[in-house]
DNA sequence: GCTCCTAGCTTGAGGTTTCAACCATATCCC
DNA sequence: GGGATATGGTTGAAACCTCAAGCTAGGAGC
């Protein structure tokens, strides 16, 4: 089968995207690393936890949420635990699963880091785009994401059972109400 | 100064982009790694060399072309040299600069890797987008890239002198002699 | 020539990610 | 009950990237 090469426009688009997104991500990484000593991936983990009911998720849920491998999460959370930002605990009934919860320090970290990070995202991305382009960006990558998730679907099996209210004893944390708008960039 | 948070739409766009692009890049990386034992970044290096006149570039030119740090390039090319895909050689007159050139094996590698890679880019990206979206994608990231290159300009002082016409960064349109299309995804 | 400074690149250490292997607990099914 | 299998996580090694430091060669100024 003969390869369908990219035409000239596609090439240009592809390369702009590849380098643009790479540099953008690197810039964000550097900002967080410099200002908070935190890689972007780690910030996302803290952020994801900060949004979870009870600021707690199982490792699997966390992995799904930040779209990372189990291994990556395990290493990362180990590191975050050393840093005192996260604490791990065995699940009561199912002793295989471990729960990761944000410590007070962890919460403070997210709260401290969020404004600078959001500013960076604004400066480097949204402030440079028209609102329509922002929309388009979202549309395009929701499509891409859809395709990729399909590919993964056989691999991941998203637990139908919802690990009920996690730990059951969630102290006042059950603000399950936070629906649709799960923003990862603003701590709660 | 009070932080300008992202509104709901921006959040959604931002997260779709962040995860979509991340997963996309990881998917491409895996494809190349699996089929050719080559990380995407390394493929880009080989690809850049394959387009250069004489299949040769100085380390600095290479760094500009693939938008990577000198250090990264140095490590990477060292690795590629071990693998026999690239050869390094001191410059005759200016003994500081070293030139990296693709070996025959290196050429063969790019030729072998290109079709699968391009297929992947098509399958995962362009085939899922309308032509207009493809255009938009390019536009958006040319803009982003413009901003980032400006930021970098003071930091990296990529010597103003334009190191000979070598296939540098033309996203901005500076298409030079070698037949227009400047694709990084098709070996020559 | 000598000194100081810059350019070009390399090196080493430290941190993150990946891959494959592994452990422990649950679950299925006879 | 008990073995096979699946699930949830962890671990260690190897690979890659980043950062800071260093090293050599070219240039500028005197």
Image (cartoon, coloured by chain):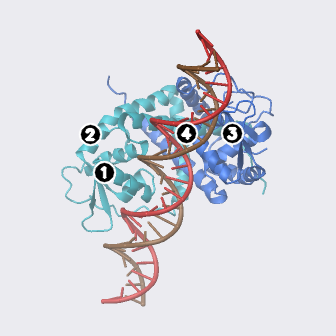
Chain colours: A cyan, B blue, C brown, D red
Cα–Cα span, label 1 and label 3 = 45 Å
Q: Residues within 10 Å of mark 1 (few under 14, many from 20)?
A: few
Q: Secondary structure at mark 3?
A: helix
Q: Give the chain of mark 4.
A: A
The vertical placement of A57 against A51, above or below, is below
The CA span between labels 4 and 3 is 18 Å
Quarter assignment of residue A59: bottom left
Residue picked out by circle 2: A108
Element marked by disc 1: helix
Q: The residue tagged with tag 4: helix, strand or loop? A: helix
Q: Nearer the viewer, residue A160 or B99?
A: B99
Which mark sits nearer the N-terminus, 4 or 2? 4
Q: Nearer the viewer, mark 4 or mark 3?
A: 4
Query: What's the chain of the residue with tag 2?
Result: A
Task: Look at mark 1 in the image and give the residue it sits on.
Answer: A82
Q: Which quadrant of the rendered structure holds the N terminus of chain B?
A: top left
| Residue at image mark 4 | A22
**Rendered location of residue A128, percent (x, y):** 51, 26
Q: CA distance from mark 2 to mark 1?
A: 16 Å
Answer yes or no: are tags 4 and 2 on the same subunit.
yes
């Amino acid at each position: 089968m003969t390869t369908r090469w990219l035409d000239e426009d596609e090439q240009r688009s592809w390369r702009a995207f590849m380098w643009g997104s790479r540099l953008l991500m690197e810039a964000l990484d550097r900002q967080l690393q410099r200002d908070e000593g935190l890689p972007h991936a780690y910030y996302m983990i803290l952020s994801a936890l900060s949004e979870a009911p009870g600021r707690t998720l199982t490792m699997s849920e966390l992995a799904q949420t930040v779209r990372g491998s189990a291994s990556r999460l395990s290493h990362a959370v180990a590191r975050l635990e050393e840093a005192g930002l996260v604490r791990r605990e065995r699940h009561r009934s199912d002793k295989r699963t471990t729960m990761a919860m944000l410590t007070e320090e962890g919460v403070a970290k997210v709260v401290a880091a969020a404004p600078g990070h959001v500013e960076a995202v604004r400066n480097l991305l949204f402030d440079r785009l028209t609102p329509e382009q922002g929309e388009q960006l979202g549309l395009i990558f929701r499509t891409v994401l859809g395709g990729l998730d399909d590919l993964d679907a056989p691999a991941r099996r998203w637990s139908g059972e919802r690990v009920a209210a996690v730990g059951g004893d969630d102290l006042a944390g059950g603000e399950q109400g936070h629906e649709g708008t799960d923003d990862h960039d603003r701590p709660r």
